[in-house]
Image (cartoon, grey):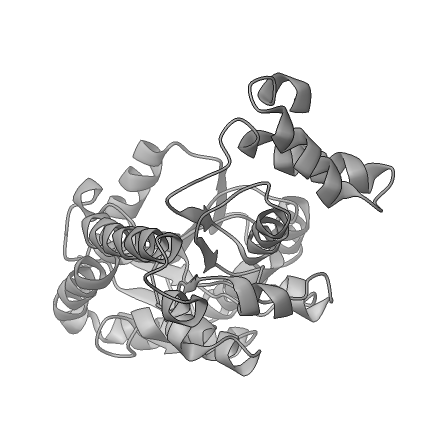
């Protein structure tokens, strides 16, 4: 790959080899692989790294002259939670030399500052969804109708689906008439199906597996309440703010989520949705009952949820924000290259 990319700029390969000096085996191969895409053209208006650990790679490559341009780094979830807790990354140099940091929530902004990232280098840029793909359909449940609950997400520990299944068992014992659909696949699928069988919930809990975006949209529009019981995983992994939760709320469906990471910035309890504690199936079951009993407010809560998502997470808004950021970074880089600014001015 390196030979293919660098035929027109061999000095790029030389610099990449300099970066890899001291590495051996898979370490050398990994560094060369990460360098290869930049070899034909090493100068960029903006280098946007979509996760923190990729920002570290870009900083290393820029130090050695493999690439040039302002480094903008997004923090989305596991890069600021699991990787930090397990000691897989050290962001010290990135915080010193990176030009701008874009956490997806205010919660992550506070964490970055606590870790030593300069506050003036941080701007919250939320993960976007296309609200126009979903229709706002305020929910209501008809007399005698079975309540339809839904969760959309990968079957990982941090999604907390185990606690939703256990909550369904509690509601079954309270004679609540409902079904619960789980859309998605992942490594915990077998364990979750086993739990469902052990709790004798096969008639109430349905695993729909992987679905196309259109199928997911249809499922959302046909459901009454969305459940997103996110938790901090045992390895430290956390959500940012789940896109699936935003998509559910964009249909004007009442949503129940946990007080986890940045979720309370999206779900305002009693206003744009409902919040409950992490890893507490009894509390989740009680919250579901609360929402059922609050059915006359579903319309108001659902419309407020849709408006909140449109105002803060709609893709057009985020594109506009990113465009402004890119233009600002590019302009500062040009001025700095021309000698109009010193390094501290460029960072600011």
Q: Position of residue 212 (x, y in %)?
A: 39, 31
* Residue 246 found in image quarter: bottom left
Question: As rendered, which of 71 and 165 lies closer to the eye?
Answer: 71
Question: As rendered, which of 243 and 22 lies closer to the eye?
Answer: 22
From the image, which quarter does the N terminus lie in? top right
Q: Position of residue 73 (x, y in %)?
A: 47, 57
Question: As rendered, which of 236 and 245 lies closer to the eye?
Answer: 236
Question: As rendered, which of 100 and 291 lies closer to the eye?
Answer: 100
* Residue 177 found in image quarter: bottom left
Q: Is residue 74 visible?
A: yes
The residue at 80%/42% (across/down) is 27
164 lies above or below 215: below
Left or right for 223, reference 74? left
Left or right for 297, reference 342? left
Q: Position of residue 196 (x, y in %)?
A: 60, 53
Count of numbered badges drawn on the protein: 0
Left or right for 129, reference 24? left
Left or right for 217, reference 201? left
In the current view of this chain or complex, which residue is farthest to the bottom?
114
The residue at 46%/39% (across/down) is 43
Q: Position of residue 270 (x, y in %)?
A: 25, 79
In the current view of this chain or complex, which residue is farthest to the front?
339
153 lies above or below 97: above
37 lies above or below 149: above
From the image, which quarter does the C terminus lie in? bottom left
Q: Is residue 91 visible?
A: no
The residue at 68%/62% (across/down) is 89
């Amino acid at each position: 790959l390196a030979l293919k990319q660098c035929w027109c700029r061999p000095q790029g390969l030389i610099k990449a080899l300099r970066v890899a000096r001291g590495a051996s085996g898979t370490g050398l191969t990994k560094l060369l692989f990460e360098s290869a895409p930049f070899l034909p053209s090493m100068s960029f208006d903006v280098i946007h790294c979509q996760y923190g650990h990729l920002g570290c790679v870009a900083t290393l490559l820029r130090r050695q002259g493999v690439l040039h341009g302002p480094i903008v780094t997004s923090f989305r979830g596991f890069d600021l939670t699991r990787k930090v807790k397990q000691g897989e990354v050290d962001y010290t140099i990135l915080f010193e030399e990176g030009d701008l940091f874009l956490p997806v929530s205010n919660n992550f902004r506070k964490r970055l500052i606590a870790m030593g990232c300069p506050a003036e280098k941080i701007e919250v840029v939320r993960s976007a969804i296309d609200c126009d793909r979903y229709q706002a359909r305020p929910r209501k449940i008809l007399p005698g109708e079975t309540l339809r609950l839904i969760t959309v997400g990968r079957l990982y520990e941090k999604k907390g689906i185990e606690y939703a299944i256990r909550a369904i068992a509690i509601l079954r014992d309270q004679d609540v008439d409902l079904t619960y659909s789980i859309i998605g696949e992942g490594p915990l699928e077998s364990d979750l199906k086993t739990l469902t069988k052990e709790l004798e919930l096969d008639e109430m809990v349905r695993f729909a597996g992987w679905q196309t975006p259109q199928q997911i949209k249809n499922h959302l529009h046909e459901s009454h309440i969305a459940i997103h019981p996110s938790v901090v995983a045992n390895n430290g992994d956390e959500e940012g703010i789940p896109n699936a939760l935003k998509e559910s709320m964009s249909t004007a469906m009442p949503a129940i989520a946990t007080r986890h990471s940045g979720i309370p910035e999206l779900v305002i309890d009693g206003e744009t949705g409902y919040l409950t504690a992490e890893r507490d199936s009894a509390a989740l079951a009680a919250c579901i009952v609360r929402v059922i009993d609050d059915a006359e407010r579903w319309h108001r809560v659902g419309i407020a949820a849709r408006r909140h998502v449109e105002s803060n997470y709609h893709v057009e808004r985020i594109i506009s924000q990113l465009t402004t950021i890119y233009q600002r970074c590019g302009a500062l880089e040009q001025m700095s290259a021309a000698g109009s600014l010193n390094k501290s001015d460029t960072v600011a």
